[in-house]
Amino acid sequence: MSQEIRPIDEIVKDLSPEQQRELRDFAEFLLTRRNERPRGKPGFLWAGALNDLRGHYNSVDLQHQISRWRTDGE
């Protein structure tokens, strides 16, 4: 019950021009996806970047400032 695998160029010849365009678009998509770099775990290189501001602001001050920004923008 083995099926012969037809070469892709033979299959393409049997497709309509519109189907051939779709197949080309899909093949190009597969090629671009293959070339994308794999995503890893996010890095936290920014962590600690604002340590020098720690003594100047606290969370309550920041909440009040955010509230002012929201009301100023309306």
Image (spheres, grey):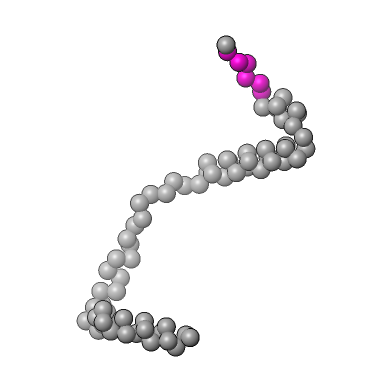
The location of residue 26, given as percent across then percent down, is 63, 41
The location of residue 12, given as percent across then percent down, is 72, 30
Residue shown at 44% from the left, 46% from the top: 38
As drawn, the residue found furthest toward the left would be 55
Q: Say which quarter of the image contains residue 45.
A: bottom left
Magenta segment: 2-7
Q: In this view, does 49 lie to the left or right of 8?
A: left
Q: In this view, does 56 lie to the left or right of 35?
A: left
Residue 6 in the image: above or below residue 52: above
Residue 55 in the image: above or below residue 23: below
As drawn, the residue found furthest toward the top would be 1
Q: In this view, does 20 lie to the left or right of 51?
A: right
Residue shown at 33% from the left, 66% from the top: 46
Residue 68 in the image: above or below residue 40: below
Image quarter (top left, top right, bottom left or bottom right) of the N terminus: top right
Depth check: 30 or 15 in front? 15
As drawn, the residue found furthest toward the right would be 17
The location of residue 72, given as percent across then percent down, is 44, 88
The location of residue 48, given as percent across then percent down, is 27, 68
The reply to whether the magenta stretch includes residue 30 is no
Q: Is the magenta stretch mostly helix, strand or loop?
A: loop
